[in-house]
Image: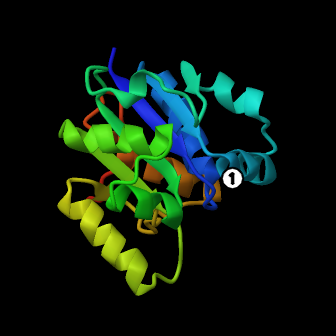
């Protein structure tokens, strides 16, 4: 069973991380969750879930201050997704600041040449954001702002979220991902 690390930070869009955990479970992917304190606040504020409810969506939850398996390259994972990814977390990853388990897991993902997807949530971008996205990309990360596609004519926010999550799962080459293809006009 493939393992996926999911980080949830304090940027708006906690629904992306939560839906990613749900879909990963449905397709048989083992998940390891790391959430920042601001991420937990946003999960509660935006979705009404407390820490216990969020952690129940993952196969294993790790505290931000833990020294856990995720901090080692010997712990084999398929990939890591930070959903949503705050600009603070992006900056830490882009500059190699591994000061907590989430940023250390991202650093390990990059050093082991595994896929790291950063679902950045901020608008508009300033020059520091753009430079950090460039640096992270140059190191091998994939910057994936969850921008909705409208050619499928989504009827709800949930459909837009689901489509972004499916595209991420497909990008990670996980069996069971089901993004909708655009078939042209």
Return the x and y of residue 67 as percentages of the image width and height: 49, 26
The total of numbered circles placed on residues is 1
Q: What residue is at 32 percent from the left and 26 percent from the top? A: 72
Up the image or down, 62 lies above or below 185; here it is above
Horizontal and vertical percent for residue 23?
50, 32
Which of the 4 quarters of the picture holds residue 80?
top left
Most foreground residue, 27 or 115:
115
| Residue 62: quadrant of the picture | top right
At numbered mark 1, what does the secondary structure look like: helix, strand or loop?
Answer: helix
What residue sits 26% from the left and 59% below the top? 183
* Residue 184 appears in the picture as rendered: no
Q: How is the image coloured?
A: rainbow
Instruction: Kindly identify the residue that appears in the image at 53 percent across and 72 percent down.
Output: 122
Return the x and y of residue 60 as percentages of the image width and height. 55, 20
Residue 8 horizontal side relative to residue 3, left or right: right
User: Percent from the top left, x then y, of residue 142?
Assistant: 28, 56
**Quarter of the image where the N terminus is located:** top left
Task: Identify the residue shown where x is 67% and y is 22%.
Answer: 56
Other residues around mark 1 within 10 Å, as few (<14) / some (14–19) / many (≥20) = some
Q: Nearer the viewer, residue 38 or 17?
A: 38
């Amino acid at each position: 069973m493939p393992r996926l690390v999911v980080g949830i930070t304090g940027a708006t869009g906690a629904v992306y991380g939560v839906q990613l955990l749900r879909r990963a479970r449905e397709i048989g992917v083992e998940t390891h969750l790391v959430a920042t304190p601001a991420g937990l606040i946003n999960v509660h504020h935006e979705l009404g879930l407390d820490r216990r409810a969020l952690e129940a969506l993952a196969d294993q939850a790790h505290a931000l201050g833990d020294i856990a398996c995720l901090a080692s390259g010997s712990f084999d994972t398929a990939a890591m997704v930070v959903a949503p990814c705050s600009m603070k977390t992006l900056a830490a990853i882009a500059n190699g600041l591994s000061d907590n388990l989430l940023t250390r897991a991202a650093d390990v993902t990059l050093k082991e040449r595994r896929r790291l997807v950063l679902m950045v949530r901020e608008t508009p971008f300033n020059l520091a954001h753009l430079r950090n996205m460039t640096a992270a990309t140059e190191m091998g990360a994939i910057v994936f702002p969850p921008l909705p596609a409208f050619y499928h004519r989504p009827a709800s926010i949930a459909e837009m979220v689901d489509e972004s999550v499916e595209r991420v799962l497909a990008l990670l080459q996980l069996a069971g991902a089901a993004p909708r293809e655009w078939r042209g006009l």
